[in-house]
Amino acid sequence: MTLPPIDTLVAALQRPEGLGALGPAAWDILVRQGRQADLLARVGALAEARGHWEQLPVEPRRHLGSAMGLAARQHTELRHEVVQIARALEPIGMPVVLLKGAAYTMAGLDASLGRMVSDVDILVPRARLADVESALMMGGWVSMNRDAYDQRYYRTWMHELPPLKHMTRGTVLDVHHAIMPLTARLKPDSDRLLQRARPVGADPRVQVLCAPDMVLHSAAHLFHEGDLELGLRGLVDLDALLREFAADPGFWPELLARARALQLEWPLHQALRYAGMLLHSVVPAHVTEALQHSPGVRISTWRQRLMDALFLRALRPAHASASDAWTPAARFLLYLRGHWLRMPPAMLVWHLLHKLVRPVQADPQK
């Protein structure tokens, strides 16, 4: 299987010291792929953090600098928004447990360098969901979606409320009560995640998941979803987390133990496999072997080859220079797979039919 290269982008993310030697054609591909993958700001941030910024040509620096400026503004807005969410939830005694990009940024992790953060994701106990929603409404957040079907879809089957938007600031907040839909085949216990959450900084109201759980949530989100347009960014997040957390000798044993306890060995196996294949992430052999022998991970050779053919296409930047003739089919099949993993067959058919019919109903001329 020969696919168009993404070597220049991967090398820029891992060895920014080599950016100064790139020619115009390589820079053109790097900027196009990096922008499409939402990784352009990270390329620039890594070059700057490691002292190679001045070696870069002027024109590419303009592209990188623009993306870095947007990421910096988003981080500033995020910090302000997290304080506002903490204030809103304080009367009900609820901490703000951040997920994904918001967590990486507030915790000051390497994964936050140049990381775009367009909204805030938090995790709360399902039993307190009504209290949380009421407190947030009092703070100015309202549901963005008024469609009755969508409201029922989120509240009955999914792992989160419909997205909330602040009435004055326009910021978007996703309130999760689980990291997998209620109808999904995998059912990690959210209480276990919340029990191990830890504060970041001086404000005890702001928390993040523990290191292994951050990795597991990132893996579950990436390999249980059907939309992989920013799949490479998710894989870069994973790679950054693994490289940083691996400095702790106890990280890998704890990661395996948490994966077993949370029923997330399969997405972890996939995450480590493709992080290694695309980003050259270093994973200890004993970790790979332990996952391969897990009952929840065992997979036939032909099925693994099929998964490789799909994911190694869909996890690339959604740009013509990184795609081949089979890439659209791979993305579509993984989109269907994501829905298949999220809900039982009958519910899936009904949901997809509703999504197909609704646009036609909305426009009487169609």
Image (cartoon, rainbow, N blue to C red):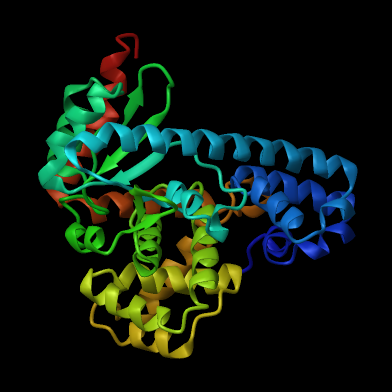
Asked whether residue 143 is in view, the answer is: no
* Residue at 29%, 15% in the rendered image: 362
In this orientation, which residue lies closer to the viewer: 35 or 108? 108
The quadrant of the image that shows the C terminus is top left
Relative to 238, say whether 251 is above or below.
below
Relative to 97, say whether 22 is above or below.
below
* Residue at 43%, 36% in the rendered image: 119
Residue 245: percent from left, percent from top: 48, 72
Position of 229 with respect to 122 (left or right) is right
* Residue at 89%, 42% in the rendered image: 58
In this orientation, which residue lies closer to the viewer: 53 or 363? 53
Residue 241: percent from left, percent from top: 50, 65
In this orientation, which residue lies closer to the viewer: 159 or 73? 73
Instruction: Identify the image quadrant of residue 264.
Output: bottom left
* Residue at 85%, 50% in the rendered image: 25
Asked whether residue 293 is in view, the answer is: yes
Residue 195: percent from left, percent from top: 22, 62
Residue 342: percent from left, percent from top: 23, 52
In this orientation, which residue lies closer to the viewer: 271 or 110? 110
Position of 144 with respect to 70 (left or right) is left
The quadrant of the image that shows the N terminus is bottom right
Total numbered labels placed on residues in the image: 0
Position of 40 with respect to 223 (left or right) is right
Relative to 89, say whether 307 is above or below.
below
